Image (spheres, rainbow, N blue to C red):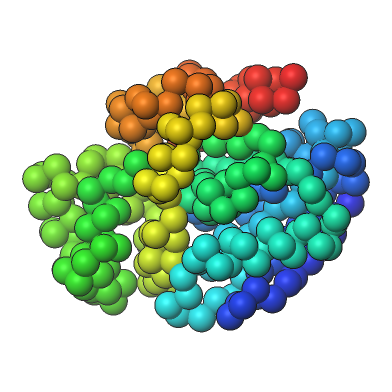
């Protein structure tokens, strides 16, 4: 078992915690998905122990990160984090790996520091396209009001969620995820805070424009997606990437859980062979 070193650094208006796994020359900055923690990368750390040092960053409102209500991750936080890593570990070149909604922060780093990023490994990434439901909940007063009501009066809102699903504003997979991760008021509140914290981070128009004008840079991105993923819609994902022929797209025989023990070894071999 590798030694895990825990760090905390103050970025602008908040404190960010991260974990260091390994002591090799290549650096890989990692972001897990909603509701997870750093242990999800244990197998990755073991596989790369001779070649990489992993810097695993706690997501906002996850792990040891205790943010204030209303905290929002911005480009300034992205730049402060990468500047800290450069100084603390003397990093010149590094790679990124992110799963699910953690990809929103990884995409922000890639956009802000693209020249220093060697590779970007996106696993079932959220943020490459924005679902109508996510935009509705985080992008206007009605959606935010619905989320507030759901936090405090969940049974009243269940009917509205069913209506949104019936009218296809909310797809069936998102409905299942939403209902399964909101059993307590604490979980509902954290979900609301987290979604609003990262909702402006995605595959931005500026990043898309840059990659189209510089197709060689597209080769830095390796994307993995499950053909049966109920959360990241395969059709919408691939459609959003039509203009980027040099992004390496890897199809996997799984759903959203790419850390499945029969699937993740395939990802490791394709990504790091």
- Count of numbered tags: 0
Between 93 and 100, the residue placed more toward the observer is: 93
Q: Residue at x 42, y 47 (%)?
A: 206
Percent of width and height locating residue 55: 75, 52
Percent of width and height locating residue 11: 65, 73
Between 98 and 46, the residue placed more toward the observer is: 98
As drawn, 272 above or below 197: above
As drawn, 83 above or below 123: below
Q: Quadrant of the N terminus?
A: top right
Residue at the limit of the structure toward the front, as seen here = 213
Q: Quadrant of the C terminus?
A: top right
Q: Residue at x 30, y 40 (%)?
A: 173
Displayed quadrant of residue 191: bottom left
Between 196 and 248, the residue placed more toward the observer is: 248
Percent of width and height locating residue 44: 73, 36
Is residue 151 visible to us here? yes
Percent of width and height locating residue 204: 40, 48
Tell me: 48 left or right of 217.
Answer: right
Q: Residue at x 82, y 45 (%)?
A: 53
Is residue 1 visible to us here? no
Q: Residue at x 42, y 70 (%)?
A: 193
């Amino acid at each position: 078992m590798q030694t895990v070193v825990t760090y905390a650094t103050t970025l602008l208006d908040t404190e960010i915690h991260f974990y260091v796994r390994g002591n090799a020359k290549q650096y890989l900055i990692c972001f897990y998905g909603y509701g997870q923690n750093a242990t999800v990368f244990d197998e990755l750390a073991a596989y790369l122990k001779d070649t990489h040092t992993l810097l695993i960053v706690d997501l906002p409102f996850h792990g040891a990160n205790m943010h204030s209500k209303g905290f929002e991750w911005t480009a300034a936080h992205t730049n402060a984090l990468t500047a800290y890593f450069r100084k603390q570990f003397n990093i010149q070149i590094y790679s990124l790996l992110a799963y699910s909604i953690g990809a929103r922060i990884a995409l922000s780093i890639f956009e802000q520091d693209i020249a220093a990023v060697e590779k970007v490994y996106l696993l079932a990434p959220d943020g490459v396209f924005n679902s109508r439901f996510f935009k509705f909940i985080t992008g206007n007063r009605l959606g935010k009001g619905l989320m507030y009501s759901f936090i405090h009066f969940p049974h009243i809102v269940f009917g509205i969620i069913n209506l949104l699903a019936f009218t296809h504003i909310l797809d069936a997979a998102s409905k299942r995820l939403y209902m399964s991760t909101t059993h307590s008021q604490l979980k509902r509140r954290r979900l609301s805070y987290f979604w609003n914290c990262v909702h402006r981070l995605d595959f931005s128009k500026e990043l898309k424009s840059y990659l189209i004008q510089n197709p060689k840079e597209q080769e830095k991105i390796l994307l993995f997606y499950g053909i049966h993923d109920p959360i990241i819609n395969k059709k919408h994902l691939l459609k959003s990437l039509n203009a980027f022929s040099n992004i390496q797209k890897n199809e996997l025989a799984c759903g959203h859980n790419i850390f499945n023990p029969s699937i993740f070894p395939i990802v490791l071999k394709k990504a790091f062979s």
